[in-house]
Image: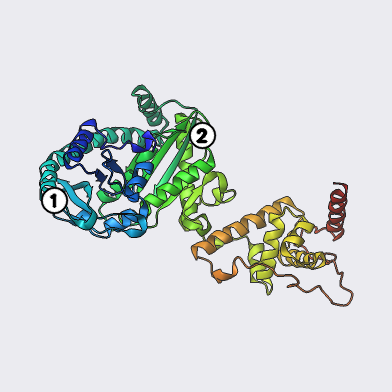
């Protein structure tokens, strides 16, 4: 376990001395868990460690399965000490647990491994004598940490303020106070929770617990601020922060929140883009907010959105919620969707545009003959009145399809959501067999007034050119 993952607001030397002193008297391993039962502070070993203790020592926190098992036994509501049941599949032996409270606040849990769910009377008495001092020290450390955090939090939120003057002053104070380095690379992540009936203080504790380990990592120096149902994490580094590392961090945060009932209400995380140091942190923050909207609205993101991966959604999702409705769909696309073959043609158009207009690649992706593809492209042009060789028309249709995808994910489209991702099977569109019809299909296409739709030879020439290039390669 690295030192940076062990550091928590409860990590004072005096508190560690009290834990070690009790462990020495008992000749048993003692652990102190925070109020989320996640982060663990441990004494030295006394040859009684079980696999669950070894895991917490290696990773700096209990496993999610162990946390859920302990919380399900209601330890946070216990009025006095008691024994928790073991969990064989996680290698967790029974524990003697003492809820630590001060001035009505639940601070954490003092635990001692107790095989057989029993302890000698003299051990119970020793724990009872030590508990008030440990609880008092824990409370004092928490008050001090809260004061330090509040100052850091105010400065961090000011750094992300819309006012340039406020941001400049906050940046100067953060640097002068040594709270953050003036590193050249900055990324802001936002953790957003859904509405919860849990008290705000309990939610804030869960968020702090999930983010505390990211104050300092091997790759970055961080700071975070917690507001009701939201946390903002700023990370600074001498090197550009790797997107994969940021996603892994977000996955760990999600896992930690998932084990805490106070914070398990639909959490999502948005990762902002990489910016140049503290001065541009607000830009990353604004991008993270857009990524949060993407994570909330696009199920395929599984709760974690990254600005760097959003593509055109980065633009669309900056529209206000009330504007995201079917009125945004371009009229030509609506005409296509309302046509008799709208479902099949939509799939074809989406694939054609995603393949940058390449007929061979589109036909291969759809597993249909090129003749069938040409027939579909002719139908699309006839219905929409748009020219698929025109860049502006392609953008119109492509953005329209992305908006439709977003609306379907939100459940705001009138269409059956199950139709939105239908894949085309081979041969699902017949070739036009009408006597005299052009089998390749685009000759005679009707365009809207003022627009000229090119004849089919445009696609034929492109087809031949791509085939020649492929043979030459």
Residue wearing tag 2:
275
Q: Quickly name the residue at label 1.
A: 120
Q: Nearer the viewer, mark 2 or mark 1?
A: 1
Residue 450, quarter of picture: bottom right
From the viewer's perspective, tell me whether residue 221 is left or right of residue 439. Answer: left
Residue 381 makes an appearance in the image: yes
Binning the other alpha carbons within 10 Å of mark 1 as few (below 14), some (14 to 19) or many (20 upward) gives few
Query: Picture quarter containing residue 416?
Result: bottom right
- The one nearer the camera, 214 or 40, is 40
Q: Residue at coordinates 78% horizontally, 74% vertically from top-left?
A: 430
Q: Is residue 196 visible from the viewing direction of this image? A: no
- Image point 20% across, 40% down: which residue? 23
- Residue drawn at point x = 21 percent, y = 33 percent: 17
Lateral position of residue 184 relative to residue 371, left or right = left
Camera-nearest residue between 289 and 177: 177
Residue at 26 percent of width and 45 percent of height: 34
Q: SS of the residue at dot 2?
A: loop
């Amino acid at each position: 376990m690295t030192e940076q993952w062990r550091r928590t607001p409860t990590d004072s030397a005096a508190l560690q001395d009290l834990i070690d002193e009790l462990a020495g008297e008992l000749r048993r391993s003692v652990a102190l868990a925070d109020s989320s039962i996640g982060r663990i502070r441990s004494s030295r070993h006394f040859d009684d460690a079980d696999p669950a203790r070894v895991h917490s020592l290696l990773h700096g926190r209990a496993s999610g399965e162990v946390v859920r098992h302990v919380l399900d036994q209601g330890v946070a509501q216990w009025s006095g000490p008691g024994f928790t049941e073991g969990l064989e599949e996680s290698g967790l032996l029974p524990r003697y647990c003492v809820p630590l409270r001060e001035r009505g606040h639940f601070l954490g849990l003092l635990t001692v491994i107790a095989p057989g769910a029993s302890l000698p009377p003299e051990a119970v008495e020793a724990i009872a004598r030590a508990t008030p001092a440990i609880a008092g020290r824990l409370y004092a450390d928490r008050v001090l940490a809260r004061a330090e955090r509040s100052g850091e939090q105010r400065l961090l939120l000011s750094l992300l303020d819309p006012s340039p003057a406020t941001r400049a002053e906050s940046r100067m104070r953060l640097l002068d106070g040594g709270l953050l380095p003036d590193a050249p690379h900055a990324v802001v992540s936002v953790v957003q929770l859904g509405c919860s009936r849990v008290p705000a203080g309990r939610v804030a504790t869960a968020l702090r617990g999930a983010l505390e380990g990211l104050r300092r990592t091997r790759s970055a120096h961080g700071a975070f601020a917690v507001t009701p149902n939201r946390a903002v994490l700023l990370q600074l580094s001498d090197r550009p922060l790797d997107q994969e590392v940021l996603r892994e961090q977000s996955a760990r945060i999600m896992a930690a929140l998932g084990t805490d009932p106070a914070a398990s209400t639909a959490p999502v995380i948005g990762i902002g883009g990489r910016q140049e140091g503290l001065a541009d942190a607000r830009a990353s923050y604004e991008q993270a907010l857009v990524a949060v909207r993407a994570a909330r609205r696009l199920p395929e993101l599984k709760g974690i959105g990254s600005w760097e991966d959003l593509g055109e959604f980065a633009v669309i999702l900056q529209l206000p919620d009330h504007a995201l409705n079917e009125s945004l769909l371009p009229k030509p696309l609506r005409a296509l969707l309302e046509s008799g073959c709208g479902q099949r043609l939509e799939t074809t158009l989406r694939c054609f545009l995603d393949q940058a207009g390449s007929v061979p690649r589109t036909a291969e992706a759809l597993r249909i003959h090129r003749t069938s593809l040409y027939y579909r492209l002719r139908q699309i042009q006839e219905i929409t009145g748009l020219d698929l060789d025109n860049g502006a028309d392609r953008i119109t249709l492509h953005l329209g399809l992305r908006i439709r995808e977003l609306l379907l994910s939100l459940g705001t489209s009138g269409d059956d959501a199950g139709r939105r991702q239908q894949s085309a099977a081979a041969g699902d569109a017949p070739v036009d067999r009408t006597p005299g019809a052009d089998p390749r299909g685009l000759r005679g296409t009707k365009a809207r007034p003022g627009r000229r739709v090119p004849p089919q030879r445009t696609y034929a020439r492109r087809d031949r050119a791509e085939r020649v290039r492929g043979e030459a390669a």
